[in-house]
Image (cartoon, helix red, strand yellow):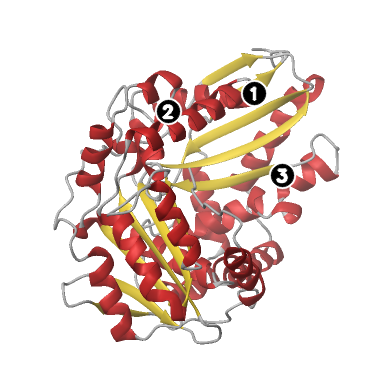
Amino acid sequence: MIIAKMNGCLSRILFVAFLALAVSKAHASVEIREITSAKGIKAWLVEDYTIPLVAVNFAFRGGSTQDPSGKEGLSNLMSGLFDEGAGPLDSDVFQEAIDDASAEMRFNASRDAMYGSVKFLADRGEEALALVRMAVNEPHFDDRPIERIRSQLVAGIKSRERDPQTRAAHKWVEELYGDHPYARRNRGTEQSLAEITSQDLKNAHRRTFARDNLSIGIVGAIDEESAKRALDQLFGDLPARADLAIVKDTQPLAGKQVHIEYELPQTSLRLAWPGIEREDPDFFAAYVMNYVLGGGSFSSWLYNEVREKRGLAYGVNSYLSNFDHASSLGINTATRSDRAAETLTIILGEVERMMVEGPTEKELEAAKKTIIGGYAVNNLDTSSSIASTLVELQLSDLGIDYIDRRSKLIGGVTLDQVKSVAGRLFSVEPSVMIVGPKPIDGE
């Protein structure tokens, strides 16, 4: 859940309009420095005085994998409550203060982390940082806001449950991950959310929000000494150590066959294989291979064979997914029910071709060029996206020089490496889920 409260006051509207104009310039390159505050808190800093704006992004490892059994959705609910009263301020006063400071504050929970961010004008930093400090260190978790946010979440869950694709997605992760926390519902259920108390939220906050569990990115019009002081102000009073439950590494189960019969206009197909970890030496070969196969949108093999040549689907894509405790390679598409078997056969044929033939030299070079060139556009185009990227690089332990090294690592991928990693990843039978009105022929 992402919380971004705006009450429509003039200063807030002007601030948002300013952001839309001010951050549109793409950053061709960034100079990243690691800084350490007086209290020992580390962060990655990019100074940029192009516009008088500062973005601070941070993450605490944990996320929904830390939700107790029977109280799924706790982390998601917690993410909606940080601006619902903190420190000496109740919910209404706190949100008015955010508006008055012309700041934008957000929190959201993923499977593996709790994320937070704040954007503010450089000359309003003192006010904005004081509010973030309260939200991070002294959230209230009062009963009335809990009930309001819980009701909103339950309404969303009920609405999504009427969508067969949502229900199928739940079934899919349950089949792939069994009793692992990744199989749980991140948003929770109506029943699990009803069990969560204010004390549960306080306990989760205390276990997760700690200095050893923190990654931070700071970007904008702020110098190193000011950034260090901000770090101590925001995070210096947190507990030294987190108290996280151990989560085991896993991988999606291969060879599962799942058919969910719904009377839908189309049949959707999902395929999944165990993936490859980011630290694996073959990761970039896999990344390039996936781009050629189905990750490159209009230029990919799957798009060409499924959409362009045969008109079987509006879109088809493949992707690598990396979580803290599992990695996967997936393919998704949707097609006419009477041609679902044909579509699946074509997809598996392209997978086989990737293992046997691999891409041409021309395809390989085009993929590498696009992947290298697209990184700045996708990850370094605004202060907020740079700050977010800095946090993700730290969470993945990729190193402060990763952006500089990335181009060389991708540029060095060879045809033999692509074929080799394809053979490795596709050597097992995929798990397949079919959602639609008819079984695939032969099932």
The residue to which callout 1 is attached is 163
* Residue on which disc 3 sits: 302
Task: Tell me what residue is drawn at x 36 percent, y 41 percent.
Answer: 78
Is residue 322 found left or right of 438 in the rendered image?
Answer: left
Q: How many neighbours does mark 2 have within 10 angstroms: few (below 14), some (14-19), or many (20 or more)?
A: many
In the rendered image of this protein, does residue 181 appear above or below residue 10?
above
Can residue 339 be seen here? yes
Question: Mark 2 or mark 3, which is nearer to you?
Answer: 2
**Local secondary structure at mark 3:** helix
**Mark 2 or mark 3: which comes first in sequence?**
2
Q: Residue at x 39, y 25 (%)?
A: 193
- Between residues 190 and 186, which one lies in front from this camera angle? 190
Residue 58: image quadrant is: bottom left
Residue picked out by circle 2: 188
Kindly identify the amino acid type of the residue bearing the numbered disc 3.
Answer: Leu
Mark linked to residue 91: none
* Secondary element type, mark 2: loop
Amino acid type at circle 1 is Asp
Q: Position of residue 16 (x, y in %)?
A: 61, 66
183 to the left or right of 5: left
